[in-house]
Image (cartoon, rainbow, N blue to C red):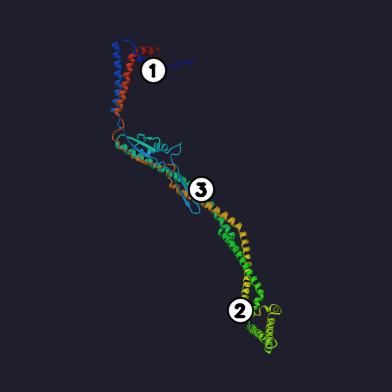
Amino acid sequence: MQQPKKKSRALTKLLGLLHRILLKERNTSTRMRRYVLTGVLLLSLIWLAVGAYSLLSPKNYTSEMTLILPGARSSSVFSLDSIGQANTQTDSPFSSITSTPKIIYQSIALSDEVLGAVAAKLGMELTDLAKPRIDLIDETSLMVFKVYAGKAEAAQHRAQVVLEVFLAKLDDLRRDEVEKRAQSIRQSLADVEKNLKKARGDILDFQQDSDLVTSEQIKSVANQVEELRGRVEQVHADGERVNGERERLAEILGISPAEAAIALRFQDDPRYASLLKERTDAMTALATNEQKWGPNHPLALSWHARFVAADMAVRQLASGDLGPAAQMTLDQFLTTSKDRAELFRKLVELDSQYDGLKSNLAALRASLKHQQDDLGNRSGKAARLADLERNHKIAEAVFSSALARVDTGREDIFGSYPLVQVMSPPTLPSKPTSPQPKIAAIGGGVASLLVLIGVWLAWIRQPFLRKHLTVS
């Protein structure tokens, strides 16, 4: 069987003392004196302790200061023209439910490093420095520091030193974070810069081995092809229009452009012009005399002979210069009409214009084919160059963004350790916070009341206590 637990000696002695004092059989007067003596003794002990606390305890002053941690978010965007952009964003320090800056800052402020620096500034040992108290106000971003000292001015000065050392420690932590972050980014910049140099080198190698230097060249060739295609269509349309006018005018005149050119050639020849004029005058006079005198009149016969001679001379001149083929169409342009000659000239001009448009169209089509072949040959190279330029732009954007992150990282120094503002500076206490005689007196009064109630209960419940303590 399990042995019952033995009562301690102190409990045994206390029960024995209570038994002897309260339960021992005595008369009423003796019992009264015993209870009064016990009450007076207990009350004396209580008020002796209260007096000793109020008179002998060293005075202690408390200087308070309140710090506030703003919780707003911040963000910024840096646009890099034709490259990209760099974004920086600082979330609210109170957005995490696992840890808040108040808890972290409390640990930092109460750390041995910070308190040791405070003690060193005050010229005292760390063990002699009263540890400050930090109260965190719930549902707010407020931190209340309470710093203790034996004098009011000393408490205020000590609180100011605590504040300076605490803020200096936060600045050191921020600088260390920024430098380590920048160092990490600079290390990654080496690979990014290597990729950028490789992309630039690939473009240079391609440009040296190819006749395509920039992507604008392929655009220029494509624009030239489109322009040539439009000119070909325009020249073809102009040729069709001129050819239609030429054929219609030749049909109206009943003469081909080549024959019209022969007619204009003869009309411009002085020999032909004089013979043609003589022929025309003889034909006119012959018609007049035949109408007036009849065909057998000597004048009519004379003018007929002159007309035949002039006509023979014109035909012989044409045969000598143009050959027998001229005789087939010579009768069509044996005229001195200025209007008909102007139409001949118009026909020749249309024919020449048509031939020029045909030659121009052929040259444009040849040039278009050449440009199309050149465009087809350069299309593959242009695609390769576009890929290289895109890779270069990506590498350049990554490199520039990394550089921007270095600079923006230096600006964002409150990312992990948010800004701390002094809401109220260290106060100069007007009275000590301890000892507090009023509170000690209240406590002594409550303790005295409890003692009196206990003695009274013991007086009226003696039979119950005797029975209970006897059994125990």
The residue closer to the viewer here, 397 or 220, is 220
- Residue 42 horizontal side relative to residue 269, left or right: left
The residue type indicated by label 1 comes to Leu
Instruction: Report crowding for label 3: few under 14, some 14 to 19, many 20 or more residues within 10 A (C-alpha).
Output: few
Residue 111 shows in the view: no
Identify the disc placed on residue 188: 3
The mark closer to the camera, 2 or 3, is 2
Q: At 64% from the left edge and 70% from the top edge, which residue is drawn?
A: 248
Q: CA distance from mark 1 to mark 2?
A: 157 Å
In the picture, the quarter occupied by the C terminus is top left
Q: Which residue is mark 1?
A: 11
Which quadrant of the view contains residue 118? top left
Mark 2 — residue? Answer: 338
Q: Tag 3, which secondary structure?
A: helix
Marks 1 and 2, the one that precedes in the sequence: 1
Vertical position of residue 461 compared to residue 379: above or below: above
Q: Amino acid at mark 2?
A: Lys
* 389 relative position to 70: left or right: right
